[in-house]
Amino acid sequence: MNTPRINVAGVILRNNKLLLAEYNDASGIHYNFPGGGVHLGETLHDAVKREVWEETGARVTVGKLMAVWEYIPPEDDPYGNVHKIGHLFNCELVADSEPNMPEQPDPSQVGIRWVSLEKLDTIQLYPELGQDLHRIIRGELDNVFYGKV
């Protein structure tokens, strides 16, 4: 296994809905917070801004750190053996910045969706933060660390 990869993602809320990137790959349809890997020399906040832009076409301001998660894949993981440490940040859309499907999406990205907070339990969302996700979004849990998700 290589050095852990540092990931970032943005939690973007509007009208009680969460902005998510939609993917369809070998595991089926699933959703991710807009985000990805941090480049060498890039700050976490700059990485969140870039990744949200790349996946949703939206500009954001980056707020507080909401959660940290870690993914250590099993040896037979079909997606590779990359150990990831992710940082989930609260973000807000910049005025007049409206999300839309990027011109050059990731190969398996099929859309972006506003998903009602009440429907989060009905979709496959990565990382899997379980029931705590609602509490994190409402600000009831601060800077939560999740071991392997």
Image (spheres, rainbow, N blue to C red):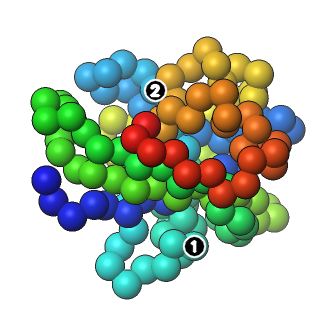
User: Which residue occupies 55% across, 51% down?
Assistant: 145
Density class for disc 2 (Cα within 10 Å; few <14, some 14-19, many ≥20) is some
Q: Which amino acid type is marked by label 2? A: His
Q: Across the whole image, how many numbered discs are drawn on residues?
A: 2
Q: Of callouts 2 and 1, which one flags the residue occurring earlier in the amino acid sequence?
A: 2
C-alpha separation, residue under disc 2 versus residue under disc 1: 25 Å
Residue at the right extreme of this rendering: 15
Q: Which amino acid type is marked by label 1? A: His
Percent coordinates x, y for residue 91 in the rendering:
70, 59
**Which of these two is toward me, 1 or 94?**
1
Instruction: Give the SS element for disc 2.
Output: strand
**Which of these two is toward me, 103 or 54?**
54
Report if residue 112 is visible in the image.
no
Task: State whether residue 65 is above or below residue 145.
Answer: below
Which mark is on residue 30? 2
The quarter of the picture where residue 108 lies is top left
Task: State whether residue 18 is above or below residue 41.
Answer: above
User: Which residue occupies 28% across, 60% down?
Assistant: 4
Instruction: Give the SS element for disc 1.
Output: helix
Query: What residue is shown with label 1?
Result: 45
The quarter of the picture where residue 38 lies is bottom left
Which quadrant is the C terminus positioned in? Answer: top left
**Which of these two is toward me, 141 or 108?**
141
Percent coordinates x, y for residue 17 in the rendering:
76, 35
Percent coordinates x, y for residue 34 in the rendering:
53, 49
Report if residue 17 is visible in the image.
yes
